[in-house]
Image (cartoon, coloured by chain):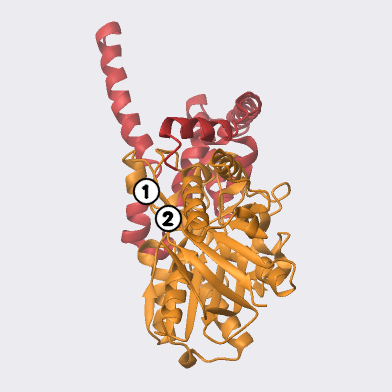
Chain colours: A red, B orange
Amino acid sequence: MENISKEEYQKIVKKHTPHEDRLKNGIIVFIAGGIMGVLAQILMQVYINFFNLASSDASVLVIITFIVLACILTGFGVFDKLVRIFKAALLIPITGFAHAMMSSAMEYRKEGFVTGIGSNIFKLTGTVILYGVVSAYFFGMIRYFIMGA
Amino acid sequence: MTYKYKNVYIKDSALVGGKYEQEGPLKSFFDKTYKDFYFGEATFEQAEVKIMKDSIDVLLNKVNKKTSDLDLFIAGDLSNQIVTSNYVARDLNIPYLGVYNACSTSAEAILIASNMIDAKQASNVLVSVSAHNLMAEKQFRFPTEYGGNKLKYTTFTVTCGASILLTNEKSKIRVESATLGKVNDMGVTDVNNMGGVMAPGACDVILTHLKETNRDISYYDFVLTGDLGLYGKEILKELMSKNNVNLDKYNDAGVMLYDLKNQDVFAGGSGPSCGPSVLYGFILDNMKKGKMKRVLYVPTGALMNTTMVNQKMTIPCISHAISLEVVE
């Protein structure tokens, strides 16, 4: 291997590494994500019209419904297969967060409630929570200084 | 460093696979397969112990031997602290050497066993490797039920327990020589691109082997790499041709084991039992039937863990070459 430099080798690797079809994936996610939004809106209208809920309560209930559905589908081993088809359209909404927590909890169930589930359930979502809180703090500050309380 | 052996033979081998291996084109070369990922055990880790143990049971049955007939057990796998091999060894109650060279563990183990048999330090050595797809996913990637999207060039860990019995008793196939590889690092940091990480290891050890044995690549009827996958295979071919070696009678076990068009395995199989899953079945069978006389087995291993990958370190690799020959 002495006759090939690292730079030269990187070029060979690059040449033989396939590219992901970003445009196709983007279109799938755009359509599937849009459908997710429409479904959520329909569900919200159902909650408002049939259960006489205020729209703020109904939207919370829609989120809870999606979380429960994502967890159940993860438990039955279906959600990961759906993600393979619809990609980020299912991961970016709240369903992705629920799915990540549920799959972590399931994975470490056999290692005990504290050493297993307890210490691993936020394995994937810990990042989202941490940086979600930090960025909310900063954006809140910016808003406070620009627009006032 | 190349060792030549005079009296190291392959008595027999056994393969036990999982669901994807059962659906692949080489299914008939497996002695036993399972339809799920648990094999009747409670966890993936325990399932892997079971599949390695199964392969040993099948092998000992085939050759009509008991564990007490064996001098030594050499084994390795992907789990942390090679715990699968350790738990299998616990139940065998014979001397044990745990070895680890990631996905080239099988060659490392065969090489050590052959050296010991040739030096008359042992007469019957059992060599086993195993891997479990979901155990590896859990340990190296994401929780198994998590549906993160995979890149096209990702490889798929083969679920398989593979055992082989090496002996000084004459048989149809012998281990002719073996070349110890060096650790190479060509600066690849992408942990998904295992083919790219490991191809330099294979190239290096094949060149060393040919040089030290004074052979041309045409000496071999077939060259088998372990788990470079669809794209890593092309990288190796290009590396070899840059060194004026034309790899035409060559394939990669990860590509051969699965039907890449119809099975959801991305760029092909990987893991310590990927090479053996093709070598111990398909290749040895072809050798017994006389379709192949000389085979060079070159499994490749990526020597990393998740900590080093997260610290953005480049990934080193290793590969050893084993030359098998039909006894005339």
User: Disc 1 vs disc 2: Cβ atoms closer than 8 Å?
Assistant: yes
Q: Earlier in the sequence, mark 1 or mark 2?
A: 2
Along the viewing direction, whichever of B231 and B246 lies nearer the viewer: B246
Mark 1 Cα shell of 10 Å, populated few (<14), some (14-19), many (≥20)? few
- Residue at left offset 43%, top offset 75%: B115
Along the viewing direction, whichever of A140 and B51 lies nearer the viewer: B51
Measured as percent of width and height from the top left, residue B221 is found at 68, 60
Check disc 1 and give the amino acid type: Thr
Q: Using residue B280 as the reference point, say whether residue B131 is left or right of it.
A: left
Q: Which residue is mark 1?
A: B306
Measured as percent of width and height from the top left, residue B83 is found at 39, 69
Measured as percent of width and height from the top left, residue A63 is found at 51, 35
State which chain disc 1 sits on: B
Judge if badges 1 and 2 mark residues of a common chain: yes
Q: Which mark is residue B138?
A: none
What secondary structure is found at the residue carrying circle 2?
helix
Residue B161 in sight in this render = yes
Along the viewing direction, whichever of A99 and B241 lies nearer the viewer: B241
- Residue at left offset 63%, top offset 59%: B219
Check disc 2 and give the amino acid type: Gln
Q: Using residue A57 as the reference point, say whether residue B281 is left or right of it.
A: right
Measured as percent of width and height from the top left, residue A27 is found at 65, 24
Would you place residue B194 above or below residue A117 in this image?
A: above
Q: Which residue is mark 2?
A: B139
Would you place residue B231 above or below residue B207 in this image?
A: above
- Of badges 1 and 2, the one in the foreground is 1
